Image: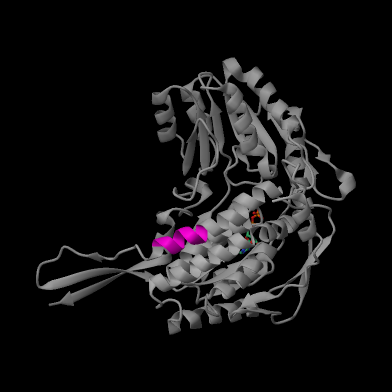
């Protein structure tokens, strides 16, 4: 990855994009498109098809038809594996192109997008491709006059709705296991970050995924997303996004065909630093990256920092120093450590959180303001808000921006109580040299993942999913594939 290749890719015009249905780009019912702005400079970037319920219907019919005729669903797992491995190779070969395209509409710093988006998508397709011909059914321990077989049957048509922060990474966490298991997929990307996923659909066709098996309908959540989740012919929904939309999906399911909904929602993850942390300097450095990279637009971001009283002031000063040290700027500049906030409304919402926090008595130690306004892009200074109280809006609500809420605690009991004092349960972190305390905190923090003496960075081998109002179900690891199968029993009299 070098700057001149990145600059050459960013200079390329982006042609107006259609949906991807039945193996090809299609304009859809009305041919209408919406304008996508680039967060890098606020300028028009691309025209994306504005989907309608009829477009969703067309995609679901294509997906259902492909599923029923068995062109993919009844292909031997080893055959699907071969195609998906080829797709992984194609993604890897085009990784920089995919990463730059994705950064142009979502604003993530290129160093992160290249690894966590493009290369991670390739790795995810490879992982599930390799897994799929190693998953066995079962023979039940019945009496000798019958045979009970438990099959893994693909569920049928999978509806997937993904957000704008990591479209390729999160998209492939859903598409790869769904396809590997033999399902057809209809995906709706975020309206402001569809470009890189549309490219993946083209690469999937090139790799040999048959027509109709993988479809994308672009457009608004309230139109395309709603129609997909209300469809009587979609068998399960997999979703990453806000709690508000997650609730809606459950309503759509209840109003339609009771499809199962797997929801990865927001978080307000506690990152707890004890005075006995093995290396406080390292804890400050990693914790700063854990909230500020990708401008805090990371669902598992350690957005609530809980610091033990005796080290509180020093630690807040150290993390504020790191916050000020980050180079925020053009996400396609290799020197930038942090890129853009995704959109103007997101930026405004972040700033409003800061204003409200100050009104509620929190202290702004650094940041809290829009920067680089002259670029026309959406950038915000990494922000540290100290002395945030449990009852404050900033303690209780997800910002999804580069805003850290810091709260002191006295002892382990108080740390645990504060850690669990929100409705969320996605991630957490604990920094301590005391092994017993580390295990007690892992057991006590109500979250899908708890990091110890680090924050973030878990790989594909472990599941990611929330508890409480952070959702249900898991992406990543072999566990993720379970939801894309129904268990089917054959009871055979011998
Ligand atoms: P975020 O805060 O990450 O934008 P959203 O839940 O609004 O969270 O968006 C995540 C995804 O959900 C996007 O693809 C968006 O278009 C979609 N979405 C938004 N509203 C709805 C809805 N009413 N029904 C279905 N999908 C929706």
126 part of magenta stretch = yes
Image quadrant where one finds the C terminus: bottom left
Name the residue at the right extreme.
374
Name the residue at the top extreme.
310
Identify whether 387 is placed above or below 476.
above
Q: Which residue: 16% across, 62% down? A: 141
Identify whether 103 is placed above or below 46.
above
Left or right: where 129 falls relative to 121 = left
Residue 242 picture location, percent across and down: 61, 53
Task: State whether the magenta stretch is mostly helix, strand or loop.
Answer: helix
Left or right: where 400 falls relative to 45 = left
Q: Out of 250 and 194, give the one closest to the viewer.
A: 194
Q: Out of 336 and 416, give the one closest to the viewer.
A: 336
Q: Which residue: 46% across, 24% down? A: 413
Q: How many numbered tags mark residues here?
A: 0
Q: Is residue 260 visible?
A: no
Magenta stretch, residue numbers: 124-131
Residue 468 picture location, percent across and down: 48, 46
> Which color scheme does this rendered protein use?
one colour
Q: Quadrant of residue 400?
A: top right
Q: Quadrant of residue 93?
A: bottom right
Residue 251 picture location, percent across and down: 54, 63
Q: Out of 133 and 139, give the one closest to the viewer.
A: 133
Identify whether 235 is placed above or below 271.
below
Residue 221 picture location, percent across and down: 65, 65
14 part of magenta stretch = no
Q: Is residue 9 visible?
A: yes
């Amino acid at each position: 990855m070098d700057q001149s290749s990145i600059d050459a890719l960013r200079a390329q015009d982006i042609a107006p994009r259609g949906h991807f249905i039945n193996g090809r780009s299609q304009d859809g019912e009305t041919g209408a498109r919406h304008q996508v702005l680039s967060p890098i400079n606020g300028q028009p970037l691309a025209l994306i098809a504005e989907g309608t319920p009829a477009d969703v219907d067309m995609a679901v019919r294509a997906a259902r038809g492909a599923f029923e005729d068995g062109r993919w669903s009844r292909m031997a797992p080893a055959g699907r594996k071969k195609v998906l491995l080829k797709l992984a190779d194609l993604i890897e070969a085009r990784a920089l192109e995919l990463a730059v395209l994705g950064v142009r509409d979502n604003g993530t710093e290129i160093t992160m997008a290249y690894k966590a988006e493009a290369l991670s998508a390739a790795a995810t397709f490879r992982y599930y491709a390799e897994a799929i011909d190693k998953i066995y059914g079962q023979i039940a321990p019945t009496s000798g006059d019958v045979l009970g077989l438990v099959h893994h049957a693909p569920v049928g048509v999978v509806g997937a709705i993904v957000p704008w922060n990591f479209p390729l990474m999160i998209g492939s966490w859903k598409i790869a296991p769904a396809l590997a298991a033999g399902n057809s997929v209809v995906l709706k990307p975020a309206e402001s970050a569809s470009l890189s996923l549309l490219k993946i659909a083209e690469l999937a066709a090139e790799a040999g995924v048959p027509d109709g098996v993988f479809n994308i309908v672009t457009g608004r959540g309230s139109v395309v997303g709603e129609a997909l989740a209300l469809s009587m012919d979609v068998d399960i929904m997999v979703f990453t996004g806000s709690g508000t939309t997650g609730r809606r999906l459950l309503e759509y399911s209840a109003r339609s065909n009771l499809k199962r909904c797997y929801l990865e929602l927001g978080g307000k993850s506690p990152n707890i630093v004890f005075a006995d942390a093995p290396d406080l300097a390292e804890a400050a450095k990693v914790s700063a990256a854990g909230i500020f990279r990708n401008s805090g637009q990371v669902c598992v971001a350690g957005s609530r920092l809980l610091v033990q009283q005796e080290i509180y002031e020093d630690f807040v000063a150290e993390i504020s120093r790191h916050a000020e040290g980050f180079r925020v700027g053009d996400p396609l500049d290799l020197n930038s450590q942090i890129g853009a906030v995704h959109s103007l409304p997101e930026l405004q919402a972040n700033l409003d959180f800061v204003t409200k926090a100050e009104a509620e008595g929190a202290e702004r130690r650094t940041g809290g303001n829009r920067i680089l306004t002259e670029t026309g892009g959406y950038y915000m200074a990494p922000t540290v808000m100290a002395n945030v109280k449990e009852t404050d809006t900033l303690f209780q609500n997800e910002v999804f921006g580069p805003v850290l809420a810091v709260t002191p605690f006295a002892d382990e009991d108080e740390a645990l109580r504060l850690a669990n004092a929100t409705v969320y349960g996605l991630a957490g972190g604990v920094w301590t040299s005391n092994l017993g305390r580390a295990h007690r905190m892992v057991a006590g923090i109500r979250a899908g993942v708890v990091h110890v003496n680090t924050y973030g960075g878990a790989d594909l081998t472990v599941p990611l999913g929330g508890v409480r109002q952070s959702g249900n179900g898991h992406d990543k690891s072999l566990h993720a594939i379970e939801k894309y199968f129904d268990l089917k029993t054959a009871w055979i009299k011998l």
